[in-house]
Image: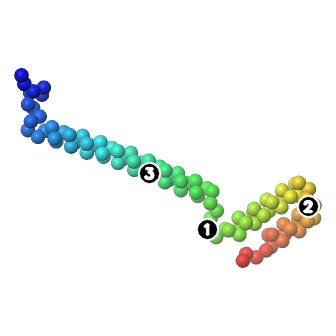
């Protein structure tokens, strides 16, 4: 009784095919991993560029937050329009520290 492959793989081709398939599978896995990594990093950078203020705009961000709070206080009736306008002018003319 002969071998199931009639001895066609006895001269090293079995190992060559094994390592070839493993190498090709590894190559595909690395390519997919790099594609996923690139996708995650580019989407993270895009998200950060939309949510983070530009460098050097800290005072503008703080002032915008203060103006928002001031507007909310006006809307709730805690301050009147004259006080709102006076405080808004003070916020906008305040020099950065």
Which SS class for mark 1?
loop
- Mark sitting on residue 70: none
| Residue to which mark 1 is pinned | 55
Quarter assignment of residue 76: bottom right
How much space separates mark 2 and mark 1, taking CA atoms?
33 Å
How much space separates mark 3 and mark 1, taking CA atoms?
26 Å
Residue 39 lies, in percent from the top left, at 47, 49
How much space separates mark 2 and mark 3, taking CA atoms?
51 Å
User: Vertical placement of 71 versus 29: above or below?
Assistant: below
Which SS class for mark 3?
helix
Disc 3: CA contacts within 10 A as few (<14), some (14-19) or many (>=20): few
Question: Cβ–Cβ below 8 Å for labels 2 and 3?
Answer: no
| Residue to which mark 3 is pinned | 37
| Residue to which mark 2 is pinned | 79
The mark closer to the camera, 3 or 1, is 3
Residue located farthest toward the top when viewing the structure as drawn:
1
- N-terminal of the two: label 2 or label 3? 3
Residue at 58% x, 57% y: name it. Answer: 48
- N-terminal of the two: label 2 or label 1? 1
Residue at 73% x, 66% y: name it. Answer: 62
Quadrant of the rendering where the C terminus is positioned: bottom right
Residue 82 lies, in percent from the top left, at 93, 64
Please give left or right for residue 22 compared with residue 68 in the image: left
């Amino acid at each position: 009784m002969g071998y199931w492959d009639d001895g066609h793989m006895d001269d090293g081709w079995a190992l060559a095919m094994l390592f070839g398939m493993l190498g090709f599978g590894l190559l595909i896995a690395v390519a997919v991993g790099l594609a996923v990594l690139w996708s995650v990093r580019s989407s993270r950078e895009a998200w950060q560029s939309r949510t983070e203020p530009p460098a050097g705009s800290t005072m503008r961000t703080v002032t915008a937050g203060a103006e928002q709070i001031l507007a909310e206080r006006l809307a709730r009736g805690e301050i009147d329009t004259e006080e709102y306008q006076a405080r808004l002018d003070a916020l906008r003319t305040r020099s950065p520290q």
